[in-house]
Image (cartoon, helix red, strand yellow):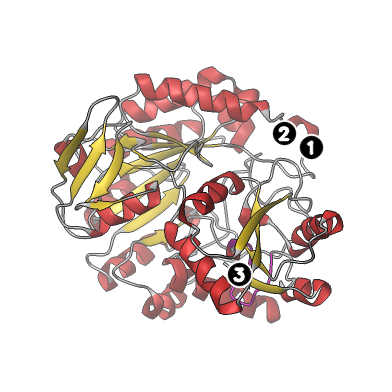
Amino acid sequence: MGEINSAENYIRDGVVDGNILPLTSNCNTHCVFCSHRFNPPEVRVYRIFPRSPTAIKNIIPFIDPARPIVIGESVTRIIEGEPFTHPDIAEILHLLRSAFPRTPVRLTTNGILLGEEMVQLLSRLGNITVNLSLNCMGEFNRNFLLGDIQAKAAVNSVKLLKKYRIPFHGSIVAMPHLTGWGDLENTINYLSEHEAETVRIFEPGFSRLAPSELQFDHALRGKLESFILHQRKIINIPITFEPPCIGSLEAEVAGVIAGSPAAGAGLQPGDVITAVNGSRVSTRVQAFRKILKAANPDVTVTRGSERSIAFVIRKGRSERSGLVMDYDLDPKLIDDMARVARQRRARKVLLLTSQLAGPVLRQGLARFWKEEADVETLEVENHFFGGSIRAAGLLTVGDMGEGLSEYLAVRTAGKPDLVLLPGLAFDRTGSDLTGTSYTRLEEEYGIALELI
């Protein structure tokens, strides 16, 4: 009973926090790169049976009609499966559209069950965007990587989405060390030819428990970066890499969706946005959000060696502009850190960060930190998952404790007054993926802690 209640709590929290609506943990593939296959046994995630239409009705009051409804996106502690394996998927989609006639729905699928009848339904319901996890093209590679014995069905779903004019984004977990670079290039080309709005390339990851044949060296990331830079020069649609490669905080445009307001205004990939409605912007996140919120924003950019150029993006308030930008840093995060430091009257602040976020946060602190308090960053290595895992959301209290112990062992100036922990690693109760509360660190080290 406790496990069921915990799962229901996470379902509700996911809806409240992100408008994320889990339907089922069932899946019709067996991906070698699945994030759940080689988890340490201590990880607390939850597998759910297909949720009934009645259960969906009961959660509807928690859905925010002003935000897109997200289905099939695996970003909570609920193991998200393939939504089209749900026996009542058509009824649930009708139910949602009836309750929210104008709310956008973002639906992630592998496309295997996306036949013509289902695509016609999506077209009739309207205002649905598909995130298609195609991953690879070749029949042998799809069988090998995904356990997909219906390779032609997923590949054909791309044609159907184009035929019925359903906007879609392609995504690929890049495994060229297993499938070859040619298959990766062919998959990008295929998605582009069939008018995907964007293509997202995900760097693969593996934990310490993954078998040796699924592991790779760190040189793969650099090779993927070079490959994507080359593809951007020859492919007309925006191609992004996640986690992104952030060299600076300049608000550089990664891509522009064809036919979008930004494309109509004349913005181009590589433009650096410097101001929105006359207000200076300092990061990609800041620029993107200002443009999203504004109606017909005036946007100033620098383009190559040219002087500043001004554009007006003709769009409604909170309407998408069509700009594609990598996620770097919201300056508000630094403001929040400063506010906590002032409230705690801290003179020495230590920020624990992941290995991925460390370089970006240091740039942000150098630019935006105005407090008298000294602030230092400490990149925490992920020992719990190990392997290539470097994201903040997968750090545990144990990882942070190890990092803090090593830091304090060589520090001669005494303990910091305040330690800031990445909030992404914790749920609403302050517990990490193993169910351990961050307050354990406070008790062990006698230092004030805050989640940020």
Which residue does the numbered mark 3 point to in the structure image? 451
Query: Dot 3: within a 10 Å radius of its alpha carbon, few (fewer than 14), some, or many (20 or more) residues?
Result: some
Q: Indicate which disc residue 424 carries.
A: none
In the figure, 322 relative to 22: above or below? above
In the figure, 323 relative to 12: above or below? above
Task: Determine the residue positioned at 54% across, 58% down.
Answer: 75
- Location of the N terminus (image quadrant): bottom right
Does residue 398 appear left or right of residue 233 in this picture?
right
Determine whether the residue tagged by mark 1 lies in a helix, strand or loop. loop
Q: Of the residues shown, which amino acid type is indicated by label 1?
A: Pro
| 184 or 224: nearer the viewer | 224
Q: Of the residues shown, which amino acid type is indicated by label 2?
A: Leu
| 117 or 71: nearer the viewer | 71
> What's the CA distance linking mark 3 and mark 1?
34 Å
Callout 2–callout 1 Cβ contact below 8 Å: yes
Instruction: Say whether disc 3 or disc 1 marks the residue closer to the N-terminus.
Output: 1
Callout 2–callout 3 Cβ contact below 8 Å: no
Which residue does the numbered mark 2 point to in the structure image? 214
Task: Determine the residue positioned at 57% across, 71% down.
Answer: 341
> What's the CA distance linking mark 2 and mark 3?
34 Å
**Residue 112 appearing in the image:** yes
| Residue 427 lies within the magenta run | yes
Does residue 169 appear left or right of residue 133 in this picture?
left
Q: Quadrant of residue 340?
A: bottom right
Q: Of the residues shown, which amino acid type is indicated by label 3?
A: Leu
Q: Quadrant of residue 78?
A: bottom right
Task: Determine the residue positioned at 50% across, 72% down.
Answer: 339
Callout 3–callout 1 Cβ contact below 8 Å: no
